[in-house]
Image: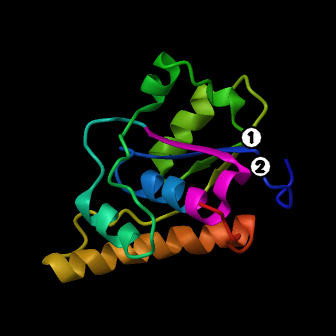
Amino acid sequence: MTQDRFPSSVLFCCDHNAIRSPMAEGMMKKFYGRAAYVQSAGVKNDTEVDGFAIAVCDEIGVPLVNHRSRSFEEMQDWGDDLGQFDLIVALSPASQRMALEMTRHAHLEIEYWPIMDPTGLAEGREARLAAYRQTRDQIRARMCDRFGPPRKVEV
């Protein structure tokens, strides 16, 4: 798939499907509507969506409160084949390795976006929110560079 073609399906992945990949999934749905089928997953599913991620996405009208974290393994258990996606965007090195391993026989595109993990970077609520905003804004910038400006989406 070439960079200029908009994918029909995208999977975002990170370590726990609790911060970066849910943010990316939510923003993709908000910015581009139903232009693509969008999901997210983590290498592990051992935590719920982070409250700071929910808060900073709420600030830009992206609801994450109903997101349920899931792992690559759970996706497969539920019948989602990674090979069905046109594009997998890995937001962490571990998720990139896992995506490459799980799709080694499929012909699909995997991109790595080096997005900062905001956990543990700051002390205190305001400093932590600032770190999460930085992560959110990194994802938004990469997304707009890759897929173009957000579209006017009918809700």
Residue 43 image point, x, y percent:
42, 37
Looking at the picture, which amino acid does disc 2 mark?
Pro
Mark 2 is surrounded, within 10 Å at the Cα level, by few (under 14), some (14 to 19) or many (20 or more) other residues, namely some
Q: Is residue 117 above or below residue 25?
A: below
Q: Earlier in the sequence, mark 1 or mark 2?
A: 2
Magenta-highlighted residues? 28-42
Q: Nearer the viewer, residue 141 or 34?
A: 34
Q: Which residue is mark 2?
A: 7
Contact between labelled residues 2 and 1, with CB atoms less than 8 Å apart: yes
Q: Secondary structure at mark 1?
A: loop
Residue 152 image point, x, y percent:
69, 71
Q: Secondary structure at mark 2?
A: loop
Q: Is residue 5 above or below residue 57?
A: above
Q: Nearer the viewer, residue 72 or 53?
A: 53
Residue 105 image point, x, y percent:
72, 22
The residue sitting at 70% across, 29% down in the picture is 84
Q: Which residue is mark 1?
A: 86
Give the colour scheme shown: rainbow
Q: Please identify the quarter of the rendering in which residue 135 is found.
A: bottom left
Left/right placement of residue 53 relative to residue 91 reads left
Residue 116 image point, x, y percent:
42, 66
Looking at the picture, which amino acid does disc 1 mark?
Asp
Left/right placement of residue 132 relative to residue 99 reads left
- Residue 113 visible in this rendered orientation of the protein: no
The residue sitting at 32% across, 62% down in the picture is 54
Question: Gap in Å between the C-alphas at discs 1 and 2?
Answer: 6 Å
The residue sitting at 58% across, 29% down in the picture is 101
Mark 1 is surrounded, within 10 Å at the Cα level, by few (under 14), some (14 to 19) or many (20 or more) other residues, namely some
